[in-house]
Image (tube, rainbow, N blue to C red):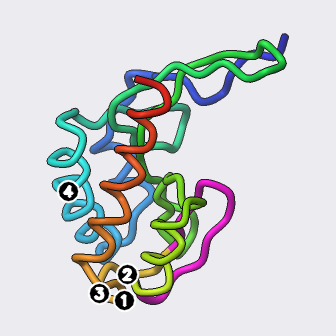
Amino acid sequence: MAKLKTTFTGASVADYLATRASPEQRADCKVLMRMLRELTGERPRMWGPSIVGYGVYRYTYPSGHSGEAPMTGFAIRGRDIVVYLDCEGKTERKLLRDVGKHSVGKSCFYFRRLADLDQAVFRELVATSIAGVRQRYG
């Protein structure tokens, strides 16, 4: 079985942000980090080389493959910040319509600047995702 790439590494979150984020991204990441800590009750930890994760859950797929992943987290991807969320439910889809300028992929919410988002809607989207992960995985 292949070795998981997204595992807790113990690397420095501050070093990651210092080397990957632009000054504007660092400011947005500080705001995002406060919010994620408030919503999860967890401190940030590096997962793999580039994900700042909060909390942890254990999953097992029908195939039997299992592992651990952060409940939520974020990464710098070029000019974008990506937040890892479950955005596929009915509630989440409605919030996505109202949140502001973004794009999505499977479990990925991309944005350029926090100023482009409705902060209350974004917070609700993140909180709803975290609640869903906790409900499904404990």
Percent from the top left, x then y, of residue 97?
49, 85
Q: CA distance from mark 3 to mark 4?
A: 15 Å
Tally of marks:
4
Residue under the image location 54 percent in, 37 percent down: 49
Q: Which mark is residue 113?
A: 2
Nearer to me, 4 or 9: 4
The reply to whether discs 4 and 2 touch (Cβ–Cβ < 8 Å) is no
The reply to whether discs 3 and 1 touch (Cβ–Cβ < 8 Å) is yes
Percent from the top left, x then y, of residue 135?
41, 34
Amino acid bearing label 3: Ala
| Quadrant (top left/top right/bottom left/bottom right) for the N terminus | top right
The reply to whether discs 4 and 1 touch (Cβ–Cβ < 8 Å) is no
The reply to whether discs 2 and 1 touch (Cβ–Cβ < 8 Å) is yes
Crowd tier of the residue under label 1, counting other residues whose Cα lies within 10 Å: few below 14, some 14–19, many 20 or above: few
Is residue 31 part of the magenta span, yes or no?
no
Percent from the top left, x then y, of residue 2?
82, 16
Residue at mark 3: 115
Residue under the image location 39 percent in, 28 percent down: 11
Quarter of the rendering containing residue 138: top left
Q: CA distance from mark 2 to mark 1?
A: 6 Å
The reply to whether discs 2 and 3 touch (Cβ–Cβ < 8 Å) is yes
Question: Is residue 96 shown above or below 17?
Answer: below
Percent from the top left, x then y, of residue 134?
38, 33
Residue at mark 4: 35
Q: Which mark is residue 116?
A: 1
Amino acid bearing label 2: Arg
SS at mark 3? helix
Crowd tier of the residue under label 3, counting other residues whose Cα lies within 10 Å: few below 14, some 14–19, many 20 or above: few
Q: Of marks 3 and 4, which one's residue comes earlier in the chain?
A: 4
Which region shows up in magenta? 100-110
